[in-house]
Amino acid sequence: GRFDFEELCDTELGAMDYRAIAHNYQVVVLENIPVMDLEGHNVARRFITLIDELYEGNCALLCSTLLENGDNTIIETPMDLFSGASETHASSQAIEEEEEQEEDGQRQSVFMGVDVAQEGGMPVGALASVRELAFAFERSASRMFEMTSRPWWDRVLGLETKE
């Protein structure tokens, strides 16, 4: 099947929809994938879910990226599609280390009448969500790399040679 990124990830589709695609298509061509960041987290989460379902469905994947005019971004690996993910992951690890060193230094704040722990001005719950998304970006990049590899395609298409 051939799909545009927007029609699959910038709409109200979910895991069941992506599972149906994986079930119906052995090869998926996904075009116009933009560079994503944490600002567009809903679209990024849908994309991650799509990649997970295609991976679990053993689909072969062919991708193309969408770069805006004048965008000098170089996409060399799937991780390059996730702008800032590695920096976010690294900074969240640094904050985690600070948390371990500064157990008693945790500040409290009130949000909607509820005490909320804060680190670096960010509610700990939001930080956990950022960490989770950064980890999911890394997992998806790894899966995309594998799903676009020659050995994966050979296996999916039944071209593997038995030795």
Image: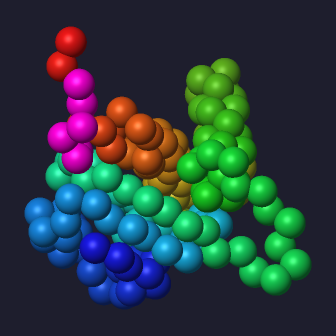
> In the picture provided, is 61 more to the left or to the right than 15?
right
Q: Which residue is drawn at 43% across and 70% down?
A: 30
Q: Which residue is drawn at 39% across and 86% down?
A: 7
Q: Residue 163's quadrant in the figure?
A: top left
The stretch in magenta equals 156-161
Q: Residue 34's quadrant in the figure?
A: bottom right
Q: Residue at x 43, y 47 (%)?
A: 148
Residue 130 x, y percent position in the rendering? 54, 54
Q: In which quarter of the image is the N terminus?
A: bottom left
Q: Is residue 159 at all visible to an observer of this figure?
A: yes
Residue 48 x, y percent position in the rendering? 40, 59
Tell me, yes or no, whether the highlighted magenta stretch contains residue 157. yes
Residue 29 x, y percent position in the rendering? 39, 68
> In the picture provided, is 62 more to the left or to the right than 91?
left
> In the picture provided, is 5 more to the left or to the right than 127?
left
Q: Which of 129 and 100 is in front in this view?
A: 129
Please tell me whether the stretch drawn in magenta is mainly helix, strand or loop. loop
Residue 77 vertical position relative to residue 122 in the rendered view, above or below: above
> In the picture provided, is 25 more to the left or to the right than 79?
left
Q: Which of 88 and 26 is in front in this view?
A: 26
Q: Residue at x 57, y 50 (%)?
A: 78
